[in-house]
Amino acid sequence: MSANDFLPTQQWPEVDDWIDHAAKGESDKPEEACGVFGIYAPGENIAKLTYFGLYALQHRGQESAGIATFEGEQVHLYKEMGLVSQVFNEQILSQLPGDLAVGHTRYSTTGSSRVVNAQPAVLETRLGKLALAHNGNLVNTAQLRELLERDNYCFITTTDSEAIAFAIAHEVSTGKDWLDGTIAACQRCQGAFSLVLGIPNGLMGIRDPNGIRPLVIGILGGDAPEVPPRYVLASETCGLDIIGAEYLRDVEPGELVWITEEGMTSFRWAKQPERKLCIFEMIYFARPDSQMHNESLYSYRMRLGRRLAAEAPADVDVVIPVPDSGIPAAIGFSEASGIPFAEGLIKNRYVGRTFIQPTQAMRESGIRMKLNPLKDVLAGKRVLMVDDSIVRGTTSRLIVKALREAGAIEVHMRVSSPPVTHPCFYGIDTDNQEQLIGATKSVAEIADQIGVDSLHFLSWQGMLEATRENPEDFCTACFTGDYPIPVPEPIKRSKIRLEDPVRV
């Protein structure tokens, strides 16, 4: 089976905006770009291990999934639109043999939602095939593509990930080896990129100089001398846990790790790395059971809730979360305030892409496709609802309406992050600034629009202090407009048009 033998040609048909938005989860949440996974484990069933790694990272992207395996010089590739469990089965996985694998689950931030844009990207180079999986977003894609097209590279996708792969292919075509060629290509890239790169003789993990997107290293099966080194790369530690790999450490900003049969070697390729992890990874994107800074994100999110209770107390009967991402902060708020915690909204965790059109009545009820209120918990109660963020305000308004229809006599809202006032250019799919409710309205105006009796956001200082880390180590551009990686003016103007965004 060659790299193209398993490339499907069928594409999903267009569906209407309502279904497409439901599939992408476009509500009051920003959407993450992707999850990446890589494994070097001779003697193991690497396709199946990669499948489960991607399964654990499914929350990072639900549009497409793919796995490329290396069997010596030969690459086996399968990728398709859909969830990991929809794309792969036992038969497909059995036809992906080898000693190393690269996996990817995608949410598009650049490039359309088509199978041709699914990853890993596989290319032929002077030194053999490469397979690349990318999490993040470049800000100099247009310039990079233009330079590569001048050198007669023909793009078949609309993604920045293909540009990175072609840049590596170009550098090795000039006589460089894999290491020097990959480093030279990365030095031409500007923006956020956590990469897993498979080549015939090893696996690479690479992180941009700011480390905006996470990438971790794990080891599988211990370090007995008679067992070949078996290493795992993943966007989050939950991708290690599911296959029984032990977390070793993070790939550092500006670091390249190269894993071969001889072990793992580290190279610092960026001259002045400056740590700027996306704070939304802490607040929302990463799974609560993933580890960052030597603790689970569940613990951090509970601290956000406790801080929120101190900053914005409320006289209510019950605290409820917006599931699932608001649960830890709601528990923290409840514990700090002494107000009982309850589940007032039940989430349908199996809502995904569907081609069955909803009825008009279902469209109007909207939120009940995903969340259904518990009337016996809410009736006659003053309810405080905790969520991790508000981006557009659309779903928040529907939830508040549903809570009132279920009998809540007051609905208050607390948000465990500040108002989102600026779009992201580093791998988060956010709207133009005019569509960010925090950029166009004051807190009082947002409260009126979504229909709550009171609304408070966590302070910027509270959000950062709860990390217990150096505040300078995080990218907070979506809250402040302070972009750590310069964004070209044409790209910035495409999303930022407000002359005087509302400050709250």
Image (tube, helix red, strand yellow):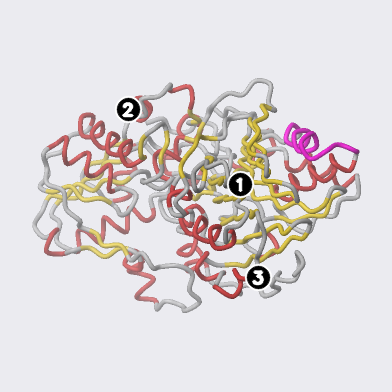
Residue beneath the point at 71% across and 73% down: 9
Q: In front here: 33 or 492?
A: 33
Q: How crowded is mark 2: few (under 14 residues within 10 Å), some or many (20 or more)?
A: some
Judging by the rendered image, the residue that carries numbered circle 2 is: 462
| Mark 2 or mark 1, earlier in chain | 1
The x and y percentages for residue 16 are 53, 71
Task: Determine which of the numbered discs, if any, sits on residue 192 in the image.
Answer: none
Which quadrant, please, contains the C terminus? top left
Question: Which residue type does callout 2 highlight?
Answer: Gly
Mark 3 or 2: in front is 3
Question: Which residue type does callout 1 highlight?
Answer: Pro
| Mark 3 or mark 2, earlier in chain | 3
Tell me, yes or no, if residue 492 can be seen here. no
Judging by the rendered image, the residue that carries numbered circle 1 is: 228
What segment is highlighted magenta in the picture?
175-187
Element marked by disc 3:
loop
Residue beneath the point at 56% across and 46% down: 232
